[in-house]
Image (cartoon, grey):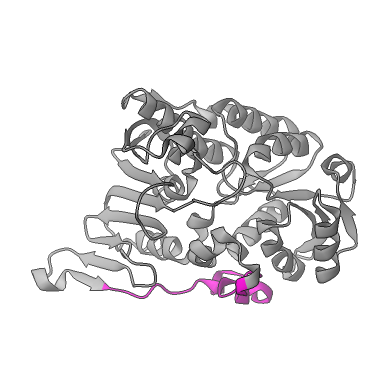
């Protein structure tokens, strides 16, 4: 495949992580960058030798050479920028979450259909080596029948900027919803969530959200499976953890309790003391073109002074970044839906939004829209 996709990256904080990946991908041309702050724009542009630079997002969208935009702007801008790009005839990759309201998720799914362009939410966990390991076990039949899925995302976000303070925990839930829905490509049908504990009053009043922890059960459509996910952001003592666990009839996979330790495989019908076994999770760089394989092990933020908080706390996001970029580019080249596509991304994002609504209503069951039907 000799075709190249002209990519523009929007937002150069966390977004800069992807620049060298696109530059070295055999089917991508790292064409343009966009950042409101001109000094930052020029610093990154000079560092990576990118000539086409925009401080105006609208000007970037008017550039006919741009095939696709990869949005890494602050969360409140995701939906607006995604809709503008789709309506301008550009393919969109966007960091999580898709939007901050169910209504905007619906609009994005509709805009994808109307424009004929592709949308992919860049959910790191479903391309992390741990998830790819479990996916491989599942596809080989080693797990047997999957019986239950569970995930968590716990993080201390004190001192984070702008829109983070006081954020309802489930409003940023895709890192735990994505893997439980993504392993078997399940569609969440309805959700019930409870809030627990309280955060400090100065944080709680920002979003009128008092809960220290939100924990939700998700029922999947046309499946006998449900999943359990929980989130915390403030006033809870816990090392950073993005965990994903799956329980099968033959084998189960459990995330380590402490960062840096190995996960555990439980194998049925063994002597009790042999059931649990620690395993090293392999890397999956061999899934990628040779030119970008080295990015599973390191990234732009490998120096302390350049460290982006999400990258450091998230343990490098499980080597997922080159897999995400490769999936997006390959889907465009092959003219197929990326994973996760628009309706899947809307489903995962809306689980969190509606879980918080459920928590405010004392655990009420809330149905999700049928995004698949809209697509």
- Determine whether, in the image, residue 347 is placed left or right of residue 51: left
* Front in this rendered view, residue 141 or 282: 282
Height in image: 278 above or below 175? below
- Determine whether, in the image, residue 134 is placed left or right of residue 6: left
Q: Position of residue 234 (x, y in %)?
A: 42, 46
Question: In the figure, residue 104 lies in which quadrant?
Answer: top right
Q: Residue at x 65, y 32 (%)?
A: 108
Q: Position of residue 267 (x, y in %)?
A: 20, 66
Q: Position of residue 171 (x, y in %)?
A: 49, 38
- Determine whether, in the image, residue 93 is placed left or right of residue 5: left
* Front in this rendered view, residue 154 or 339: 154
Residue 337 seen in this snapshot: no
Q: If the image is split into quadrants, where does the C terminus sit?
A: top right
Residue 120 seen in this snapshot: yes
Count how many numbered circles sit on residues in the image: 0
* Front in this rendered view, residue 256 or 214: 214
Q: Position of residue 50 (x, y in %)?
A: 86, 64
Q: Residue at x 66, y 72 (%)?
A: 292
Height in image: 329 above or below 342? below
* Front in this rendered view, residue 239 or 133: 239
The magenta stretch spans residue 161: no
Question: In the figure, residue 356 lies in which quadrant?
Answer: top left
Height in image: 87 above or below 12? above
Q: If the image is split into quadrants, where does the N terminus sit?
A: bottom right
Height in image: 222 above or below 250? above
- Determine whether, in the image, residue 369 is placed left or right of residue 3: left
Q: Residue furthest left?
A: 271
Q: Which residues lie in the magenta part?
A: 278-304
Q: Residue at x 57, y 34 (%)?
A: 100
């Amino acid at each position: 495949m000799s075709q190249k996709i002209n990519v523009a990256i929007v937002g150069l904080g966390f977004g800069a992580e992807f620049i060298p990946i696109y530059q070295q991908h055999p089917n991508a041309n790292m064409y343009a960058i966009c950042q409101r702050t001109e000094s930052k724009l020029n610093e990154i542009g000079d560092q990576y030798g990118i000539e086409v630079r925009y401080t105006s997002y609208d000007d970037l969208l008017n550039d006919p050479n741009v095939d696709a935009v990869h949005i890494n702007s602050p969360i409140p801008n995701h939906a607006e920028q995604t809709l503008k790009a789709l309506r301008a005839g550009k393919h969109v990759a966007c960091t999580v979450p898709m939007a901050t309201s169910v209504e905007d998720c619906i609009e994005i799914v509709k805009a994808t259909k109307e424009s004929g362009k592709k949308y992919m939410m860049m959910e790191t966990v479903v391309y992390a080596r741990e998830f790819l390991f479990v996916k491989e076990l599942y596809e080989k039949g080693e797990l047997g029948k999957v019986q239950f899925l569970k995930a968590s995302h716990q993080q201390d976000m004190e001192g984070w900027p702008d829109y983070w303070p006081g954020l309802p925990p489930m409003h940023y839930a895709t890192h735990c919803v994505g893997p439980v829905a993504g392993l078997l490509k399940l569609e969440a049908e309805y959700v019930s969530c409870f809030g627990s504990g309280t955060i400090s009053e100065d944080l709680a009043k920002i979003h009128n959200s008092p809960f220290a922890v939100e924990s939700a059960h998700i029922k999947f459509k046309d499946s006998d499976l449900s999943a359990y996910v929980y989130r915390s952001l403030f006033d809870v003592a816990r090392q950073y953890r993005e965990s994903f666990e799956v329980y099968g009839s033959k084998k189960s996979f459990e995330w380590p309790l402490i960062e840096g330790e190995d996960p555990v495989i439980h194998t049925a019908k063994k002597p009790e003391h042999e059931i649990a076994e620690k395993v090293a999770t392999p890397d999956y760089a061999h899934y990628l073109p040779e030119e970008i394989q080295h990015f599973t092990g390191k990234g732009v933020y490998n120096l302390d002074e350049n460290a982006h908080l999400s990258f450091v706390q998230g343990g490098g996001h499980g080597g997922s970044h080159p897999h995400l970029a490769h999936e997006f580019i390959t889907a465009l080249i092959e003219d197929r839906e990326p994973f996760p596509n628009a309706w899947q991304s809307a489903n995962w994002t809306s689980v969190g939004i509606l879980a918080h609504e459920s928590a405010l209503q004392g655990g009420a069951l809330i149905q999700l829209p049928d995004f698949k039907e809209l697509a």
